[in-house]
Image (spheres, rainbow, N blue to C red):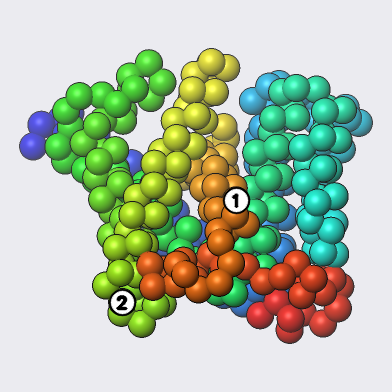
Amino acid sequence: MTNKTKSSWQDLPLRIASALVIIPVALFCIVYGGWFYIGLLVIISVAMTVEWANLFKANLFNYRVAIFLIWPLVAYAAALQGMWFPALVITGCFAFIFGSKLWLGSVVIGGAGLSLLWLRFMTFYEMWTVIFIVAVVIASDSFAYIAGKTFGGPKLMPSVSPGKTWSGAVGGLIGAGCVGGGIVWFLCGGLTTAFIGGALFSAVTGIVAQIGDLSESKLKRELGVKDSGKIIPGHGGVLDRFDALLLVSIFVAFISCVLPTGNALDKWGGALLSTKPVGDQQPIFVPLTIFR
Protein backbone atom coordinates (compact mmCIF):
# COMPACT_ATOMS: atom_id res chain seq x y z
CA MET A 1 0.00 0.00 0.00
CA THR A 2 1.42 3.38 -0.98
CA ASN A 3 1.70 6.34 1.38
CA LYS A 4 -0.93 8.13 -0.72
CA THR A 5 -3.39 5.27 -0.21
CA LYS A 6 -2.65 5.16 3.50
CA SER A 7 -3.20 8.88 3.89
CA SER A 8 -6.47 8.69 1.98
CA TRP A 9 -7.89 6.46 4.71
CA GLN A 10 -6.31 8.26 7.67
CA ASP A 11 -9.53 9.98 8.75
CA LEU A 12 -11.54 6.74 8.76
CA PRO A 13 -10.93 5.86 12.46
CA LEU A 14 -12.10 9.33 13.51
CA ARG A 15 -15.19 9.01 11.30
CA ILE A 16 -16.05 5.65 12.84
CA ALA A 17 -15.49 6.89 16.39
CA SER A 18 -17.73 9.93 15.77
CA ALA A 19 -20.44 7.72 14.25
CA LEU A 20 -20.35 5.38 17.26
CA VAL A 21 -21.21 8.34 19.48
CA ILE A 22 -23.64 10.26 17.25
CA ILE A 23 -25.75 7.42 15.83
CA PRO A 24 -26.89 5.79 19.13
CA VAL A 25 -27.81 9.17 20.64
CA ALA A 26 -29.70 10.25 17.53
CA LEU A 27 -31.45 6.89 17.23
CA PHE A 28 -32.61 7.02 20.84
CA CYS A 29 -34.05 10.51 20.39
CA ILE A 30 -35.75 9.59 17.11
CA VAL A 31 -37.32 6.44 18.52
CA TYR A 32 -38.41 7.87 21.86
CA GLY A 33 -39.67 11.09 20.31
CA GLY A 34 -41.24 13.81 22.41
CA TRP A 35 -38.92 16.26 24.08
CA PHE A 36 -35.88 14.07 23.44
CA TYR A 37 -36.33 14.45 19.70
CA ILE A 38 -37.23 18.13 19.95
CA GLY A 39 -34.29 18.80 22.28
CA LEU A 40 -31.84 17.14 19.90
CA LEU A 41 -33.26 19.14 17.00
CA VAL A 42 -32.95 22.38 18.98
CA ILE A 43 -29.32 21.70 19.96
CA ILE A 44 -28.30 20.82 16.40
CA SER A 45 -30.18 23.80 14.94
CA VAL A 46 -28.54 26.29 17.30
CA ALA A 47 -25.11 24.76 16.65
CA MET A 48 -25.63 25.05 12.89
CA THR A 49 -26.83 28.65 13.07
CA VAL A 50 -23.75 29.55 15.13
CA GLU A 51 -21.51 27.93 12.51
CA TRP A 52 -23.42 29.64 9.69
CA ALA A 53 -22.97 33.03 11.35
CA ASN A 54 -19.26 32.30 11.85
CA LEU A 55 -18.86 31.38 8.17
CA PHE A 56 -19.92 34.92 7.28
CA LYS A 57 -17.93 36.40 10.17
CA ALA A 58 -21.05 37.81 11.80
CA ASN A 59 -20.62 39.29 15.27
CA LEU A 60 -22.38 36.85 17.60
CA PHE A 61 -22.80 39.60 20.18
CA ASN A 62 -24.76 41.80 17.79
CA TYR A 63 -28.40 41.73 18.85
CA ARG A 64 -29.64 40.94 15.31
CA VAL A 65 -27.25 38.01 15.01
CA ALA A 66 -28.15 36.80 18.49
CA ILE A 67 -31.82 36.73 17.45
CA PHE A 68 -30.85 34.90 14.25
CA LEU A 69 -29.25 32.13 16.32
CA ILE A 70 -32.57 31.23 17.92
CA TRP A 71 -34.84 32.26 15.04
CA PRO A 72 -35.49 28.67 13.84
CA LEU A 73 -36.72 27.85 17.34
CA VAL A 74 -39.49 30.44 16.97
CA ALA A 75 -40.68 28.62 13.85
CA TYR A 76 -40.45 25.26 15.63
CA ALA A 77 -42.61 26.57 18.47
CA ALA A 78 -45.29 27.63 15.98
CA ALA A 79 -45.16 24.25 14.20
CA LEU A 80 -45.45 22.35 17.46
CA GLN A 81 -48.65 24.26 18.12
CA GLY A 82 -49.98 23.02 14.79
CA MET A 83 -49.37 26.34 12.99
CA TRP A 84 -47.35 24.99 10.08
CA PHE A 85 -48.00 27.79 7.60
CA PRO A 86 -47.02 30.57 10.05
CA ALA A 87 -43.91 28.53 10.85
CA LEU A 88 -42.96 28.54 7.16
CA VAL A 89 -43.58 32.28 6.92
CA ILE A 90 -41.39 32.90 9.98
CA THR A 91 -38.59 30.83 8.44
CA GLY A 92 -38.77 32.03 4.86
CA CYS A 93 -40.11 35.58 4.98
CA PHE A 94 -39.54 37.28 8.30
CA ALA A 95 -35.92 36.12 8.34
CA PHE A 96 -35.11 38.79 5.73
CA ILE A 97 -34.59 41.14 8.67
CA PHE A 98 -31.18 39.45 9.16
CA GLY A 99 -29.91 40.24 5.66
CA SER A 100 -29.60 37.96 2.64
CA LYS A 101 -26.68 35.84 3.88
CA LEU A 102 -28.19 34.99 7.24
CA TRP A 103 -31.63 34.70 5.63
CA LEU A 104 -30.35 31.80 3.51
CA GLY A 105 -29.14 30.08 6.66
CA SER A 106 -32.55 30.54 8.26
CA VAL A 107 -34.30 29.04 5.22
CA VAL A 108 -32.00 26.02 4.99
CA ILE A 109 -31.56 25.26 8.69
CA GLY A 110 -35.04 26.30 9.82
CA GLY A 111 -36.66 24.63 6.81
CA ALA A 112 -34.84 21.38 7.52
CA GLY A 113 -35.84 21.51 11.18
CA LEU A 114 -39.50 22.05 10.32
CA SER A 115 -39.28 19.21 7.82
CA LEU A 116 -37.85 16.85 10.43
CA LEU A 117 -40.63 17.81 12.84
CA TRP A 118 -43.21 17.17 10.11
CA LEU A 119 -41.76 13.78 9.19
CA ARG A 120 -41.55 12.63 12.82
CA PHE A 121 -44.92 13.87 14.05
CA MET A 122 -47.14 14.22 10.99
CA THR A 123 -46.48 11.05 8.97
CA PHE A 124 -48.19 7.77 9.80
CA TYR A 125 -44.89 5.91 10.08
CA GLU A 126 -43.49 8.63 12.35
CA MET A 127 -40.07 7.51 13.64
CA TRP A 128 -39.58 5.11 10.73
CA THR A 129 -39.85 7.92 8.22
CA VAL A 130 -37.05 9.81 9.96
CA ILE A 131 -34.97 6.63 10.37
CA PHE A 132 -35.43 6.02 6.65
CA ILE A 133 -34.02 9.38 5.54
CA VAL A 134 -31.18 9.29 8.07
CA ALA A 135 -30.24 5.76 6.96
CA VAL A 136 -30.32 6.78 3.29
CA VAL A 137 -28.10 9.81 3.94
CA ILE A 138 -25.62 7.74 5.98
CA ALA A 139 -25.58 5.02 3.31
CA SER A 140 -25.04 7.57 0.56
CA ASP A 141 -22.16 9.20 2.41
CA SER A 142 -20.55 5.94 3.58
CA PHE A 143 -20.75 4.08 0.27
CA ALA A 144 -19.55 7.15 -1.60
CA TYR A 145 -16.56 7.41 0.75
CA ILE A 146 -15.67 3.73 0.43
CA ALA A 147 -16.18 3.54 -3.34
CA GLY A 148 -14.30 6.78 -3.93
CA LYS A 149 -11.31 5.73 -1.82
CA THR A 150 -11.30 2.22 -3.31
CA PHE A 151 -11.77 2.92 -7.02
CA GLY A 152 -10.75 6.56 -7.39
CA GLY A 153 -10.98 7.76 -10.98
CA PRO A 154 -12.21 11.01 -12.52
CA LYS A 155 -13.18 13.80 -10.16
CA LEU A 156 -16.85 14.69 -9.82
CA MET A 157 -16.51 18.46 -9.40
CA PRO A 158 -12.85 19.25 -8.74
CA SER A 159 -13.42 23.00 -8.59
CA VAL A 160 -15.91 22.50 -5.75
CA SER A 161 -14.75 19.39 -3.88
CA PRO A 162 -11.44 17.95 -5.12
CA GLY A 163 -11.81 14.73 -3.12
CA LYS A 164 -15.09 13.55 -4.64
CA THR A 165 -15.06 11.18 -7.61
CA TRP A 166 -17.60 9.79 -10.04
CA SER A 167 -17.00 6.32 -8.63
CA GLY A 168 -17.86 7.63 -5.18
CA ALA A 169 -21.03 9.31 -6.46
CA VAL A 170 -22.21 6.11 -8.15
CA GLY A 171 -21.30 4.03 -5.09
CA GLY A 172 -23.28 6.43 -2.90
CA LEU A 173 -26.38 6.11 -5.07
CA ILE A 174 -26.15 2.31 -5.09
CA GLY A 175 -25.73 2.23 -1.32
CA ALA A 176 -28.62 4.65 -0.75
CA GLY A 177 -30.88 2.64 -3.07
CA CYS A 178 -30.10 -0.71 -1.45
CA VAL A 179 -30.40 0.49 2.15
CA GLY A 180 -33.52 2.60 1.54
CA GLY A 181 -35.14 -0.11 -0.55
CA GLY A 182 -34.46 -2.65 2.19
CA ILE A 183 -36.10 -0.48 4.84
CA VAL A 184 -39.20 0.11 2.72
CA TRP A 185 -39.33 -3.60 1.84
CA PHE A 186 -39.26 -4.48 5.55
CA LEU A 187 -41.92 -1.95 6.51
CA CYS A 188 -44.23 -3.03 3.67
CA GLY A 189 -44.22 -6.71 4.56
CA GLY A 190 -41.67 -7.93 2.04
CA LEU A 191 -43.35 -6.69 -1.15
CA THR A 192 -41.00 -6.79 -4.11
CA THR A 193 -42.65 -3.72 -5.58
CA ALA A 194 -42.03 -1.89 -2.30
CA PHE A 195 -38.33 -2.65 -2.56
CA ILE A 196 -38.23 -1.41 -6.15
CA GLY A 197 -40.14 1.79 -5.34
CA GLY A 198 -38.14 2.36 -2.19
CA ALA A 199 -34.82 1.78 -3.96
CA LEU A 200 -35.67 4.18 -6.78
CA PHE A 201 -36.86 6.89 -4.39
CA SER A 202 -33.82 6.34 -2.18
CA ALA A 203 -31.49 6.71 -5.17
CA VAL A 204 -33.16 10.02 -6.03
CA THR A 205 -32.84 11.02 -2.39
CA GLY A 206 -29.16 10.06 -2.59
CA ILE A 207 -28.76 12.51 -5.48
CA VAL A 208 -30.34 15.22 -3.34
CA ALA A 209 -27.95 14.30 -0.50
CA GLN A 210 -24.95 14.69 -2.79
CA ILE A 211 -26.25 18.03 -4.04
CA GLY A 212 -26.54 19.19 -0.42
CA ASP A 213 -23.00 18.05 0.30
CA LEU A 214 -21.58 19.74 -2.82
CA SER A 215 -23.54 22.94 -2.14
CA GLU A 216 -21.94 23.33 1.27
CA SER A 217 -18.53 22.53 -0.21
CA LYS A 218 -19.02 25.26 -2.81
CA LEU A 219 -20.10 27.74 -0.15
CA LYS A 220 -17.04 27.00 1.98
CA ARG A 221 -14.73 27.26 -1.04
CA GLU A 222 -16.17 30.66 -1.93
CA LEU A 223 -15.70 31.82 1.65
CA GLY A 224 -12.17 30.40 1.82
CA VAL A 225 -12.71 27.98 4.72
CA LYS A 226 -12.08 24.23 4.96
CA ASP A 227 -14.66 23.27 7.60
CA SER A 228 -17.65 24.99 9.17
CA GLY A 229 -16.28 24.06 12.60
CA LYS A 230 -14.18 21.51 14.47
CA ILE A 231 -16.63 20.03 16.96
CA ILE A 232 -16.97 16.59 15.30
CA PRO A 233 -13.69 14.65 14.86
CA GLY A 234 -13.23 13.41 11.30
CA HIS A 235 -16.00 15.61 9.94
CA GLY A 236 -15.42 19.17 11.08
CA GLY A 237 -18.48 21.13 12.13
CA VAL A 238 -22.12 20.27 12.61
CA LEU A 239 -22.94 21.77 9.22
CA ASP A 240 -20.27 19.56 7.66
CA ARG A 241 -21.86 16.48 9.16
CA PHE A 242 -25.51 17.33 8.42
CA ASP A 243 -25.24 19.26 5.15
CA ALA A 244 -26.76 16.42 3.11
CA LEU A 245 -29.53 15.80 5.65
CA LEU A 246 -30.63 19.45 5.48
CA LEU A 247 -31.61 19.29 1.83
CA VAL A 248 -32.87 15.70 2.01
CA SER A 249 -35.27 16.41 4.88
CA ILE A 250 -36.76 19.37 3.00
CA PHE A 251 -37.08 17.30 -0.18
CA VAL A 252 -38.70 14.30 1.51
CA ALA A 253 -41.09 16.46 3.56
CA PHE A 254 -42.18 18.23 0.37
CA ILE A 255 -42.79 14.90 -1.37
CA SER A 256 -44.83 13.69 1.59
CA CYS A 257 -47.04 16.78 1.31
CA VAL A 258 -47.72 16.42 -2.42
CA LEU A 259 -48.18 12.64 -2.67
CA PRO A 260 -51.68 11.68 -3.78
CA THR A 261 -54.02 10.62 -0.99
CA GLY A 262 -55.33 7.08 -0.77
CA ASN A 263 -53.41 3.83 -1.06
CA ALA A 264 -52.58 3.90 -4.78
CA LEU A 265 -48.83 4.01 -4.10
CA ASP A 266 -48.79 1.75 -1.04
CA LYS A 267 -47.55 -1.32 -2.89
CA TRP A 268 -44.59 0.74 -4.13
CA GLY A 269 -43.74 1.91 -0.61
CA GLY A 270 -45.57 5.22 -0.79
CA ALA A 271 -47.21 4.55 2.58
CA LEU A 272 -43.94 5.47 4.26
CA LEU A 273 -44.52 9.12 3.35
CA SER A 274 -48.27 9.29 3.84
CA THR A 275 -49.25 12.11 6.19
CA LYS A 276 -51.86 12.62 8.84
CA PRO A 277 -54.50 15.32 8.39
CA VAL A 278 -53.07 18.55 9.80
CA GLY A 279 -56.12 18.92 12.01
CA ASP A 280 -55.19 15.69 13.79
CA GLN A 281 -52.17 17.30 15.42
CA GLN A 282 -52.52 18.59 18.94
CA PRO A 283 -50.19 21.20 20.41
CA ILE A 284 -46.94 19.75 21.78
CA PHE A 285 -47.60 21.36 25.13
CA VAL A 286 -50.08 18.65 26.05
CA PRO A 287 -48.98 15.21 27.32
CA LEU A 288 -46.20 13.98 25.09
CA THR A 289 -47.64 10.48 24.58
CA ILE A 290 -49.28 11.82 21.41
CA PHE A 291 -45.82 12.08 19.83
CA ARG A 292 -44.65 8.55 20.52
- Badge 1 element: helix
Reading the image, the residue beneath label 2 is: 191
What amino acid is at disc 2?
Leu
Q: Quadrant of residue 144?
A: top left
Label placed on residue 254: 1
Expressed as whole percent of the image width and height from the top left, the position of residue 1 reads: 8, 37
Quarter of the image with the C terminus is bottom right
Q: Look at the picture and state if 135 lies above or below 110.
A: below
- Residue 27 visible here: no
What amino acid is at disc 1?
Phe
Residue placed at 67% from the left, 61% from the top? 118
Expressed as whole percent of the image width and height from the top left, the position of residue 213 reads: 46, 36
Nearest to N terminus: mark 2 or mark 1: 2
184 on left or right of 117: left
In three-dimensional space, the C-alpha distance between marks 2 and 1, rounded to whole angstroms, equals 25 Å
Residue placed at 24% from the left, 32% from the top? 166
